[in-house]
Amino acid sequence: MKIVLISTYELGHQPFGLASPAAWLRRDGHEVRCIDTSQQALRDHEGTLSAADVVALYVPMHTATRIAMHAIRRVRDLNPGARLCAYGLYAPMNADVLRELGVEKIIGGEFEKGLVEWAKSTTPRKPTDGLNGAPSFVSLERLTFLTPDRSGLPALRKYAKLHLPHGEELVTGYTEATRGCKHLCRHCPIVPVYNGAFRVVQKDVVLADIRQQVAAGAQHITFGDPDFFNGPTHAVAILEALHREFPAVSYDVTIKVEHLLKHADLLPILKATNCTFVVTAVESFDNAVLARLDKGHTNDDFFRVVELFRRCGLGLTPTFVPFTPWTSLATYESFLNTIALLNLVENVSPIQLAIRLLIPAGSRLLELAEIQDIIAPFDREKLCYPWHNPDPRVDELQRELEAAIQQGSRIGLPRPHVFAQVSRLANEKSGAPMKDFDPFPSRATIPYLTEPWYC
């Protein structure tokens, strides 16, 4: 069978979400072609799409899903007879919309085995009923994984790179050691699918995937786990094996604030095994907002993490959701002041200063009565519940900041300059006196990936 796998956006990484199922499908005897539309135009692959029996689109995040909706329409025009599948985190949450577009199969959670089984079938099938008669699109089966097959994907050098202090850029690979998450943060899109579960990718598979990427030129590895310390013993075993085999290869990971504190004794291991930086989702410095989001940490907890990282010499990359229904102009200025006072201006990707809370289908935020009071009906094109801040100036500021930050990124403005511009716009909106955030540390001290985090 001729199968085409499509990825639309995977945070600037060579898509694991194509490489892993490609290995399973090829083992089963299928002819598999992979298209990554972040690097390749669909129009250049119209012949491949027209000849496909099956087209499966990977939708691991919100942006990827919205782009995939346009890709689905194009595929349907080119090949009305192709059977369509959408798989990944955002597929179950948007099943109704995707099925209206002609998608036959929806798979969330552990999707590899489900893709193989579906590809074997010859007639469309209805989803199996789940709890309370609702369709079940999610599998949390514990799989024995295969080494991802990255053949046919664009070269690693075409994707995001690690920018080092002296200006050198390292070719960056990407892999996953676990999926899902033990935690139930209200705003997290992982929760509606995994509901507090996480699954381990076997150590030998992870190392084999890293090995093939190093052979293809990778000098740095991003671990895409939602929380690398969900399974700390598994994580440390992989890092120590990686460092023994490739001592010159660096890496980055994502770890919750509460896990950085709980497993503070493991931070020296990260440092010793060539960890360049740790991403941690702080979201807010407002404890009331953190409680609403059910983040599991307080602002004081994060301040302790900052101190721990400075003592052990590890890089820290915090991420935020500064614009929420509870944000005021005053709390936003306090947010900026705190970043400056903690000397983290260089550590924060500028886009993090303008992120707006997203409320997708199935979000635990919908459990909050105060959210139900402010949301509009679900937007089937934007794939979220629209909301507005009680103070329209806050929404205006968010839009202005997003535009300014995107412009700054296009022309390559240093982070301190962008931060100063953001501060100026916030001051102008509120009428508060300008703050002086100088001096900033040198940009040359902070490594970063050239693709900024988004959603």
Image (cartoon, helix red, strand yellow):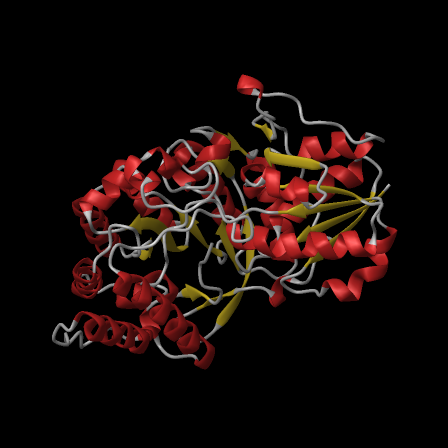
- What residue is rendered at 22% in x and 72% in y? 429
Where is 287 relative to 129, above or below? below
- What residue is rendered at 27% in x and 67% in y? 345
Q: Residue furthest top?
A: 132
- Relative horizontal placement of residue 331, taking residue 376 as reference (left or right): left
Q: x, y (%) of residue 427?
A: 19, 73
Q: x, y (%) of residue 335?
A: 21, 59
- What residue is rendered at 70% in x and 64% in y? 40
- Relative horizontal placement of residue 225, taking residue 434 as reference (left or right): right
Where is 213 relative to 136, above or below? below
- Relative horizontal placement of residue 308, taking residue 414 as reference (left or right): left
Numbered-mark total: 0
Where is 72 relative to 111, above or below? below
Residue 263 in sight in this render: no
Q: x, y (%) of residue 334?
A: 17, 60
Q: Is residue 405 or residue 204 the one in the foreground? A: 405
- What residue is rendered at 65% in x and 36% in y? 106
Q: Residue furthest left?
A: 433
Q: Is residue 75 or residue 237 the one in the foreground? A: 75
Q: Quadrant of residue 442?
A: bottom left
Q: Is residue 169 or residue 374 the one in the foreground? A: 374
Q: Quadrant of residue 402?
A: bottom left
Q: x, y (%) of residue 230?
A: 40, 34
The N terminus lies in quadrant = top right
Q: Is residue 360 or residue 276 the one in the foreground? A: 360
Residue 349 in sight in this render: yes
